[in-house]
Amino acid sequence: MKKSLIATVLTTLLLGSSAVSAAVYKVDASHSNVGFKVKHMMVSTVTGKFGNFSGMYDLEKGQFKSLSGAVNAGSIDTGIAKRDDHLRSADFFDTAKFGDINFVMTSASKSKMTGNLTIRGVTKKVTLDIDMGGTVTDPWGNQRSGFVLTGQINRKDFGLNWNKAIEAGGVVVGDEVKLVIEIEGIEE
């Protein structure tokens, strides 16, 4: 009886302490960035971002337990309105049919996150590098955390196939897209 009581108390303390260190965070879009880089004409890089996105993630002792996010593909911004309109068209994101880009984590270690990325209705497994920024209490008493996810995808894997050949050889738009996702979250 005494061993059972001690075991119950120890279990409660251990589970209780891990529950205290677990937290669910909502992405603070005003302090976050979902960006990308892609080669243009084989000699330069175009940088862009999405202005409308949301997400939630669960951290326990600095480890991801879950993460999901949605990006409004129509909120793409490369700084050139004509290019952004082309990226929203059926040649690329086809935002009239496919409004959101989604990511759902399937596993994570301290340095890598794997999940399902869906663009234009096509879902592929991707692995991203994690640069964990840590957690902090802001001046108003809110718990915040931050991290950066980076990686690379092939846009053609998701049906983003438009391109044109250039006279000197090569193509207008590179196939490889570098992702840079900088997130700050606030505990729910």
Image (cartoon, grey):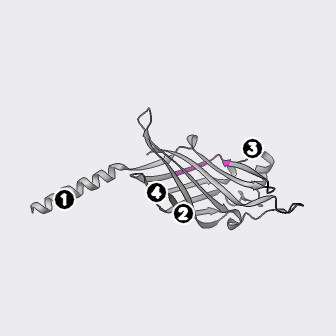
- Name the quadrant containing residue 127: bottom right
Asked whether the residues under the numbered discs 1 and 2 touch, taking CB atoms below 8 Å apart as contact, a structural biologist would say: no
The secondary structure type at the circle numbered 3 is loop
Q: Is residue 52 left or right of residue 1?
A: right
Is the residue marked by circle 4 packed among few (<14), some (14-19), or many (20+) residues within 10 Å?
few
Q: Nearer the viewer, mark 2 or mark 4?
A: 4
Q: Is residue 145 above or below residue 140?
A: below
The residue identified by callout 2 is: 115
Inspect the magenta stretch and tell me whether residue 34 lies in it: no
Mark 4 to mark 3: distance in Å?
34 Å
For the C terminus, the image quarter is top left
Asked whether the residues under the numbered discs 4 and 3 touch, taking CB atoms below 8 Å apart as contact, a structural biologist would say: no
Give whichever of discs 3 and 1 has the lower sequence position.
1
* Closer-to-camera residue (160/121): 160
Asked whether the residues under the numbered discs 3 and 1 touch, taking CB atoms below 8 Å apart as contact, a structural biologist would say: no
Give amino acid for label 4.
Lys
The residue identified by callout 4 is: 110
